[in-house]
Amino acid sequence: MSKKNLTRRQFIKHSAALSTAFAVPTIIPASAMGASGSTAPSERITMGVIGSGAQGTSNMTGFLGFKDVQMVAIADVDKAHREAAAAIVNDKYGNKDCALYNDFRELNDRDDIDAVIVGTPDHWHVLNAIDAVKKGKDAYVQKPLAWSVEEGRALCDAVTKHGRVLQTGSQQRSAKQFRRACELVRSGRIGTLKYINVGIPGNNKTCEPTWSPEPVPEGFDYDLWLGPAPWEEYHHQRCHYQFRFLLDYSGGQVTNFGAHNLDIAQWGLGMDDSGPVQVSGNGIFPESGLFTTATKTYFECKYANGVELVCKTGNFGMTFEGTEGTIYVDRKRIVTTPDSILKEDLGENDVHLYESSNHYRNFADCVKSRKDPICTAEIGHRSSTVCNLGNIAMRLGRTLDWDPAAERFVNDDEANTYLGRGMRGDWSLEA
Protein backbone atom coordinates (compact mmCIF):
# COMPACT_ATOMS: atom_id res chain seq x y z
CA MET A 1 0.00 0.00 0.00
CA SER A 2 1.44 3.40 -0.94
CA LYS A 3 1.74 6.07 1.75
CA LYS A 4 -0.53 8.43 -0.17
CA ASN A 5 -3.38 5.94 0.06
CA LEU A 6 -3.17 5.54 3.84
CA THR A 7 -5.75 7.17 6.12
CA ARG A 8 -4.42 9.49 8.80
CA ARG A 9 -4.62 6.92 11.57
CA GLN A 10 -3.10 4.20 9.41
CA PHE A 11 -0.25 6.54 8.53
CA ILE A 12 0.40 7.32 12.20
CA LYS A 13 0.67 3.65 13.09
CA HIS A 14 2.44 2.56 9.88
CA SER A 15 5.18 5.17 10.00
CA ALA A 16 6.23 4.49 13.61
CA ALA A 17 5.52 0.82 14.29
CA LEU A 18 8.48 -0.38 12.25
CA SER A 19 8.40 -3.97 13.38
CA THR A 20 4.66 -4.62 13.43
CA ALA A 21 1.84 -4.27 10.92
CA PHE A 22 -0.72 -1.56 11.59
CA ALA A 23 -4.21 -2.51 12.63
CA VAL A 24 -7.36 -1.53 10.76
CA PRO A 25 -8.53 1.71 12.42
CA THR A 26 -11.52 1.63 14.71
CA ILE A 27 -14.30 3.84 13.34
CA ILE A 28 -15.60 6.21 15.99
CA PRO A 29 -19.15 7.50 15.54
CA ALA A 30 -19.11 10.99 14.05
CA SER A 31 -21.62 12.13 16.66
CA ALA A 32 -18.92 11.76 19.28
CA MET A 33 -17.18 14.81 17.83
CA GLY A 34 -20.33 16.88 17.47
CA ALA A 35 -23.31 16.90 15.22
CA SER A 36 -21.42 18.20 12.21
CA GLY A 37 -18.99 15.29 12.15
CA SER A 38 -16.58 17.66 10.39
CA THR A 39 -13.50 15.59 11.23
CA ALA A 40 -13.54 12.15 9.64
CA PRO A 41 -13.09 9.29 12.12
CA SER A 42 -9.98 8.07 10.30
CA GLU A 43 -8.42 11.52 10.61
CA ARG A 44 -8.82 11.83 14.39
CA ILE A 45 -6.20 11.20 17.02
CA THR A 46 -7.75 8.98 19.69
CA MET A 47 -6.33 9.59 23.15
CA GLY A 48 -6.42 8.08 26.61
CA VAL A 49 -5.51 9.63 29.96
CA ILE A 50 -3.27 7.87 32.49
CA GLY A 51 -3.56 9.70 35.79
CA SER A 52 -6.52 12.06 35.96
CA GLY A 53 -5.76 14.17 39.01
CA ALA A 54 -5.47 17.94 38.77
CA GLN A 55 -2.68 18.10 36.19
CA GLY A 56 -3.84 15.10 34.20
CA THR A 57 -7.33 16.56 33.90
CA SER A 58 -5.89 19.97 33.01
CA ASN A 59 -3.88 18.42 30.18
CA MET A 60 -6.93 16.46 29.06
CA THR A 61 -9.12 19.55 28.81
CA GLY A 62 -6.40 21.22 26.76
CA PHE A 63 -6.73 18.51 24.13
CA LEU A 64 -10.54 18.36 24.33
CA GLY A 65 -10.74 21.68 22.50
CA PHE A 66 -9.29 20.21 19.29
CA LYS A 67 -11.73 18.89 16.70
CA ASP A 68 -9.24 16.30 15.47
CA VAL A 69 -8.65 14.78 18.92
CA GLN A 70 -11.01 12.23 20.46
CA MET A 71 -10.67 11.37 24.19
CA VAL A 72 -11.85 7.79 24.66
CA ALA A 73 -10.53 6.37 27.95
CA ILE A 74 -9.36 7.24 31.46
CA ALA A 75 -7.08 5.16 33.70
CA ASP A 76 -6.60 6.12 37.35
CA VAL A 77 -6.16 4.18 40.58
CA ASP A 78 -8.57 6.58 42.29
CA LYS A 79 -12.16 5.79 41.28
CA ALA A 80 -13.34 9.29 42.14
CA HIS A 81 -10.68 10.88 39.91
CA ARG A 82 -11.33 8.71 36.88
CA GLU A 83 -15.11 9.11 37.13
CA ALA A 84 -14.81 12.89 37.45
CA ALA A 85 -12.56 13.05 34.39
CA ALA A 86 -14.85 10.77 32.40
CA ALA A 87 -17.80 13.01 33.24
CA ILE A 88 -15.96 15.94 31.63
CA VAL A 89 -15.30 13.89 28.50
CA ASN A 90 -18.84 12.58 28.25
CA ASP A 91 -20.28 16.04 28.78
CA LYS A 92 -18.07 17.38 25.99
CA TYR A 93 -19.23 14.75 23.50
CA GLY A 94 -22.79 14.37 24.75
CA ASN A 95 -22.55 10.64 25.38
CA LYS A 96 -21.43 8.07 27.98
CA ASP A 97 -18.78 6.32 25.90
CA CYS A 98 -15.58 7.19 27.83
CA ALA A 99 -14.08 3.91 29.09
CA LEU A 100 -12.72 3.62 32.65
CA TYR A 101 -9.75 1.59 33.89
CA ASN A 102 -8.05 1.14 37.24
CA ASP A 103 -4.86 -0.30 35.64
CA PHE A 104 -3.15 1.80 32.97
CA ARG A 105 -1.89 -1.30 31.19
CA GLU A 106 -5.42 -2.17 30.15
CA LEU A 107 -5.82 1.22 28.52
CA ASN A 108 -2.48 0.84 26.74
CA ASP A 109 -3.53 -2.59 25.47
CA ARG A 110 -6.25 -1.02 23.30
CA ASP A 111 -5.34 -0.98 19.60
CA ASP A 112 -7.69 1.91 18.84
CA ILE A 113 -5.81 4.47 20.96
CA ASP A 114 -3.14 6.51 19.16
CA ALA A 115 -1.71 8.53 22.04
CA VAL A 116 -1.84 8.90 25.81
CA ILE A 117 -1.51 11.68 28.34
CA VAL A 118 0.60 10.70 31.37
CA GLY A 119 -0.40 12.81 34.36
CA THR A 120 0.51 10.45 37.20
CA PRO A 121 2.89 11.17 40.12
CA ASP A 122 6.53 11.55 39.07
CA HIS A 123 7.63 8.05 40.10
CA TRP A 124 5.16 6.61 37.57
CA HIS A 125 5.89 8.77 34.50
CA VAL A 126 8.50 6.54 32.90
CA LEU A 127 6.78 3.19 33.54
CA ASN A 128 3.48 4.52 32.21
CA ALA A 129 5.15 5.96 29.13
CA ILE A 130 7.39 2.98 28.34
CA ASP A 131 4.37 0.67 28.49
CA ALA A 132 2.55 3.02 26.12
CA VAL A 133 5.29 3.46 23.52
CA LYS A 134 6.12 -0.24 23.31
CA LYS A 135 2.41 -0.86 22.64
CA GLY A 136 2.40 1.60 19.75
CA LYS A 137 1.23 4.80 21.42
CA ASP A 138 2.65 8.31 21.30
CA ALA A 139 2.80 10.08 24.65
CA TYR A 140 2.37 13.51 26.21
CA VAL A 141 4.19 13.16 29.55
CA GLN A 142 3.85 15.68 32.35
CA LYS A 143 7.10 17.18 33.62
CA PRO A 144 9.43 16.27 35.18
CA LEU A 145 9.88 13.56 32.57
CA ALA A 146 11.48 11.13 35.01
CA TRP A 147 11.87 10.45 38.72
CA SER A 148 15.54 9.50 38.24
CA VAL A 149 18.34 9.89 35.70
CA GLU A 150 18.38 6.17 34.88
CA GLU A 151 14.63 6.12 34.33
CA GLY A 152 14.82 9.12 32.00
CA ARG A 153 17.50 7.49 29.86
CA ALA A 154 15.44 4.29 29.68
CA LEU A 155 12.43 6.22 28.38
CA CYS A 156 14.50 8.07 25.76
CA ASP A 157 15.83 4.72 24.55
CA ALA A 158 12.32 3.25 24.43
CA VAL A 159 10.97 6.18 22.40
CA THR A 160 13.78 5.74 19.88
CA LYS A 161 13.45 1.96 19.77
CA HIS A 162 9.73 2.04 19.06
CA GLY A 163 9.72 5.12 16.83
CA ARG A 164 7.20 7.08 18.87
CA VAL A 165 6.50 10.79 19.35
CA LEU A 166 6.83 12.06 22.93
CA GLN A 167 6.19 15.56 24.20
CA THR A 168 7.41 16.52 27.68
CA GLY A 169 4.87 18.82 29.35
CA SER A 170 7.35 21.66 29.88
CA GLN A 171 4.92 24.13 28.37
CA GLN A 172 7.04 27.24 28.92
CA ARG A 173 8.79 26.30 25.67
CA SER A 174 5.56 27.15 23.90
CA ALA A 175 5.36 30.62 25.47
CA LYS A 176 6.59 33.50 23.31
CA GLN A 177 8.53 35.36 26.01
CA PHE A 178 10.66 32.36 26.96
CA ARG A 179 11.52 31.60 23.35
CA ARG A 180 12.35 35.27 22.77
CA ALA A 181 14.61 35.38 25.83
CA CYS A 182 16.54 32.31 24.71
CA GLU A 183 16.88 33.58 21.14
CA LEU A 184 18.30 36.88 22.38
CA VAL A 185 20.75 35.11 24.69
CA ARG A 186 21.91 32.65 22.04
CA SER A 187 22.19 35.43 19.45
CA GLY A 188 24.67 37.28 21.68
CA ARG A 189 22.46 40.26 22.52
CA ILE A 190 23.69 40.30 26.15
CA GLY A 191 27.27 39.59 25.13
CA THR A 192 28.91 36.48 26.54
CA LEU A 193 26.57 34.64 28.90
CA LYS A 194 28.11 34.31 32.36
CA TYR A 195 25.40 33.53 34.93
CA ILE A 196 21.86 32.23 35.13
CA ASN A 197 19.84 32.82 38.28
CA VAL A 198 16.76 30.60 38.66
CA GLY A 199 14.12 31.26 41.32
CA ILE A 200 11.57 28.69 42.43
CA PRO A 201 8.87 29.01 45.12
CA GLY A 202 8.99 27.35 48.50
CA ASN A 203 6.70 24.51 49.54
CA ASN A 204 3.02 25.34 49.33
CA LYS A 205 1.96 22.56 51.71
CA THR A 206 2.71 22.23 55.42
CA CYS A 207 3.82 18.87 56.70
CA GLU A 208 2.04 17.51 59.76
CA PRO A 209 4.74 17.05 62.46
CA THR A 210 3.65 13.53 63.36
CA TRP A 211 1.68 10.89 61.53
CA SER A 212 0.28 7.40 61.93
CA PRO A 213 -1.13 4.96 59.36
CA GLU A 214 -4.65 5.62 58.11
CA PRO A 215 -7.21 3.36 56.41
CA VAL A 216 -6.94 3.38 52.64
CA PRO A 217 -9.96 5.28 51.22
CA GLU A 218 -12.59 3.21 49.44
CA GLY A 219 -12.08 3.13 45.70
CA PHE A 220 -8.35 3.91 45.92
CA ASP A 221 -5.89 1.21 44.78
CA TYR A 222 -3.06 2.23 47.05
CA ASP A 223 -0.81 -0.72 46.21
CA LEU A 224 -0.92 0.19 42.52
CA TRP A 225 -0.44 3.87 43.38
CA LEU A 226 2.82 2.95 45.11
CA GLY A 227 3.80 0.71 42.20
CA PRO A 228 7.61 0.53 41.93
CA ALA A 229 8.19 2.66 45.05
CA PRO A 230 8.99 1.08 48.44
CA TRP A 231 6.05 -0.14 50.50
CA GLU A 232 4.84 2.34 53.12
CA GLU A 233 1.67 2.55 55.18
CA TYR A 234 -1.01 4.83 53.76
CA HIS A 235 -1.41 8.42 54.93
CA HIS A 236 -3.28 11.15 53.08
CA GLN A 237 -0.19 13.41 52.92
CA ARG A 238 1.66 10.74 50.97
CA CYS A 239 -0.65 10.80 47.94
CA HIS A 240 -2.24 13.04 45.33
CA TYR A 241 -0.78 16.56 45.17
CA GLN A 242 1.39 16.16 48.28
CA PHE A 243 3.32 13.22 46.83
CA ARG A 244 5.72 15.79 45.38
CA PHE A 245 7.17 16.49 48.83
CA LEU A 246 8.38 12.91 49.41
CA LEU A 247 11.62 11.81 47.78
CA ASP A 248 10.29 8.31 47.10
CA TYR A 249 7.87 9.82 44.57
CA SER A 250 9.22 13.22 43.52
CA GLY A 251 11.82 15.91 44.07
CA GLY A 252 9.91 18.73 45.73
CA GLN A 253 9.72 22.16 44.17
CA VAL A 254 13.00 21.47 42.37
CA THR A 255 11.26 18.99 40.07
CA ASN A 256 7.93 20.81 40.23
CA PHE A 257 8.67 24.43 39.34
CA GLY A 258 12.40 23.94 38.83
CA ALA A 259 11.69 21.57 35.95
CA HIS A 260 10.15 24.52 34.09
CA ASN A 261 12.80 27.16 34.65
CA LEU A 262 15.77 24.81 34.48
CA ASP A 263 14.39 23.60 31.16
CA ILE A 264 14.46 27.18 29.86
CA ALA A 265 17.99 27.59 31.22
CA GLN A 266 19.08 24.54 29.23
CA TRP A 267 17.37 26.01 26.14
CA GLY A 268 19.08 29.36 26.55
CA LEU A 269 22.42 27.58 27.00
CA GLY A 270 21.96 25.41 23.94
CA MET A 271 22.35 22.36 26.16
CA ASP A 272 19.26 20.36 25.15
CA ASP A 273 21.37 17.25 24.65
CA SER A 274 23.87 17.82 27.46
CA GLY A 275 24.13 19.40 30.89
CA PRO A 276 26.43 20.76 33.59
CA VAL A 277 29.81 19.29 34.49
CA GLN A 278 29.70 20.13 38.20
CA VAL A 279 27.03 20.62 40.84
CA SER A 280 27.05 21.58 44.53
CA GLY A 281 24.31 22.43 47.01
CA ASN A 282 23.20 22.85 50.61
CA GLY A 283 19.42 22.65 50.92
CA ILE A 284 17.39 22.51 54.14
CA PHE A 285 15.35 19.34 54.71
CA PRO A 286 12.48 18.50 57.11
CA GLU A 287 13.34 17.01 60.49
CA SER A 288 9.89 15.55 61.27
CA GLY A 289 6.73 14.38 59.57
CA LEU A 290 6.32 12.58 56.25
CA PHE A 291 7.84 15.13 53.90
CA THR A 292 11.46 14.53 52.87
CA THR A 293 12.17 16.98 50.01
CA ALA A 294 14.02 20.24 50.59
CA THR A 295 12.05 23.04 52.22
CA LYS A 296 14.68 25.54 51.09
CA THR A 297 16.60 25.01 47.87
CA TYR A 298 20.06 26.17 46.94
CA PHE A 299 22.37 24.56 44.41
CA GLU A 300 24.91 25.66 41.83
CA CYS A 301 25.72 24.15 38.44
CA LYS A 302 28.79 24.82 36.32
CA TYR A 303 28.86 24.16 32.58
CA ALA A 304 31.82 23.31 30.36
CA ASN A 305 31.50 26.69 28.60
CA GLY A 306 32.07 28.51 31.90
CA VAL A 307 28.48 29.52 32.58
CA GLU A 308 27.38 29.23 36.22
CA LEU A 309 23.76 28.59 37.22
CA VAL A 310 22.20 29.07 40.64
CA CYS A 311 18.79 27.63 41.56
CA LYS A 312 17.33 28.77 44.85
CA THR A 313 14.10 29.31 46.74
CA GLY A 314 12.66 32.73 45.95
CA ASN A 315 10.44 34.44 43.41
CA PHE A 316 9.51 32.37 40.36
CA GLY A 317 11.51 33.62 37.40
CA MET A 318 14.99 33.62 35.91
CA THR A 319 17.71 36.02 34.86
CA PHE A 320 20.36 35.55 32.17
CA GLU A 321 23.41 37.73 32.91
CA GLY A 322 25.95 38.52 30.19
CA THR A 323 28.91 40.80 29.69
CA GLU A 324 26.74 43.39 27.94
CA GLY A 325 23.32 43.09 29.55
CA THR A 326 20.71 40.99 31.31
CA ILE A 327 17.38 39.38 30.48
CA TYR A 328 14.77 38.60 33.12
CA VAL A 329 11.82 36.40 32.15
CA ASP A 330 8.88 34.78 33.90
CA ARG A 331 5.37 33.75 32.86
CA LYS A 332 4.11 37.32 32.78
CA ARG A 333 6.92 39.42 31.37
CA ILE A 334 10.34 39.77 29.84
CA VAL A 335 12.60 42.66 30.87
CA THR A 336 16.03 43.51 29.49
CA THR A 337 18.86 45.75 30.62
CA PRO A 338 19.43 47.87 28.66
CA ASP A 339 15.88 48.26 27.35
CA SER A 340 17.13 48.44 23.78
CA ILE A 341 17.92 44.72 23.74
CA LEU A 342 14.26 43.78 23.67
CA LYS A 343 13.55 46.22 20.85
CA GLU A 344 16.09 44.67 18.49
CA ASP A 345 14.85 42.46 15.70
CA LEU A 346 16.56 39.15 15.10
CA GLY A 347 18.29 38.96 11.76
CA GLU A 348 18.67 36.16 9.27
CA ASN A 349 21.97 35.06 10.82
CA ASP A 350 20.69 35.13 14.41
CA VAL A 351 19.41 32.10 16.31
CA HIS A 352 15.76 31.29 15.62
CA LEU A 353 14.41 28.56 17.89
CA TYR A 354 11.59 26.06 17.42
CA GLU A 355 8.33 28.02 17.51
CA SER A 356 5.18 26.67 19.13
CA SER A 357 2.28 28.76 20.38
CA ASN A 358 0.37 25.87 21.99
CA HIS A 359 2.10 22.90 23.63
CA TYR A 360 -0.89 20.58 23.17
CA ARG A 361 -1.45 21.56 19.54
CA ASN A 362 2.24 21.07 18.82
CA PHE A 363 2.05 17.50 20.11
CA ALA A 364 -1.11 16.70 18.16
CA ASP A 365 0.42 18.09 14.97
CA CYS A 366 3.57 16.02 15.49
CA VAL A 367 1.55 12.86 16.10
CA LYS A 368 0.21 13.40 12.58
CA SER A 369 3.41 14.55 10.88
CA ARG A 370 5.81 12.28 12.84
CA LYS A 371 8.13 15.26 13.34
CA ASP A 372 9.80 16.02 16.67
CA PRO A 373 7.74 18.18 19.05
CA ILE A 374 9.24 21.20 20.76
CA CYS A 375 10.12 19.30 23.96
CA THR A 376 11.17 15.76 23.07
CA ALA A 377 12.00 12.91 25.43
CA GLU A 378 15.70 13.74 25.21
CA ILE A 379 15.10 17.42 26.02
CA GLY A 380 12.79 16.55 28.91
CA HIS A 381 15.26 14.00 30.23
CA ARG A 382 18.18 16.42 30.18
CA SER A 383 16.16 19.09 31.98
CA SER A 384 14.89 16.69 34.65
CA THR A 385 18.47 15.48 35.05
CA VAL A 386 19.53 18.97 36.16
CA CYS A 387 16.75 18.84 38.77
CA ASN A 388 17.93 15.44 39.98
CA LEU A 389 21.57 16.53 40.12
CA GLY A 390 20.60 19.50 42.28
CA ASN A 391 18.65 17.33 44.70
CA ILE A 392 21.48 14.80 44.93
CA ALA A 393 24.05 17.52 45.62
CA MET A 394 21.86 19.02 48.34
CA ARG A 395 21.32 15.62 49.96
CA LEU A 396 25.04 14.81 49.95
CA GLY A 397 26.12 18.36 50.81
CA ARG A 398 29.24 18.38 48.66
CA THR A 399 30.56 19.23 45.21
CA LEU A 400 30.01 16.56 42.57
CA ASP A 401 31.65 16.26 39.16
CA TRP A 402 29.26 15.13 36.41
CA ASP A 403 29.92 13.58 33.02
CA PRO A 404 26.91 14.56 30.85
CA ALA A 405 27.92 12.17 28.06
CA ALA A 406 28.22 9.10 30.28
CA GLU A 407 25.47 10.39 32.61
CA ARG A 408 27.47 9.35 35.66
CA PHE A 409 29.24 11.14 38.50
CA VAL A 410 32.99 11.09 38.12
CA ASN A 411 34.83 8.86 40.62
CA ASP A 412 31.96 8.93 43.12
CA ASP A 413 30.33 5.56 43.70
CA GLU A 414 28.10 6.86 46.50
CA ALA A 415 26.63 9.65 44.38
CA ASN A 416 26.01 7.23 41.51
CA THR A 417 23.74 5.13 43.73
CA TYR A 418 21.29 8.07 43.66
CA LEU A 419 20.85 7.87 39.88
CA GLY A 420 18.26 5.08 40.08
CA ARG A 421 16.84 2.40 42.34
CA GLY A 422 15.53 -1.13 42.41
CA MET A 423 11.80 -1.47 41.85
CA ARG A 424 9.26 -3.18 44.08
CA GLY A 425 7.57 -6.31 42.77
CA ASP A 426 7.82 -7.13 39.08
CA TRP A 427 8.04 -3.57 37.82
CA SER A 428 10.98 -2.90 35.47
CA LEU A 429 12.22 -0.50 32.80
CA GLU A 430 12.18 -3.17 30.11
CA ALA A 431 11.11 -1.74 26.77
Image (tube, rainbow, N blue to C red):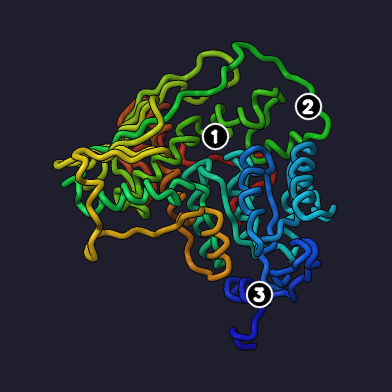
Residue drawn 71% across the image and 24% down it: 233
Badge 2 amino acid: Val
Comparing 265 with 149, the one in front is 265
Q: Residue furthest bottom?
A: 1
x%, y% of residue 349? Answer: 22, 64
The quadrant in which the N terminus is found is bottom right
Badge 3 amino acid: Thr
Question: For residue 54, which quarter of the picture?
Answer: top right
* Labelled disc at residue 20: 3
x%, y% of residue 255? Answer: 48, 36
Badge 1 amino acid: Ser
> In the displayed structure, does residue 320 sit left or right of residue 241?
left
Q: Is residue 359 visible?
A: yes
Q: Residues within 10 Å of mark 3 (few under 14, many from 20)?
A: few
Residue assigned mark 2: 216
x%, y% of residue 405? Answer: 34, 53
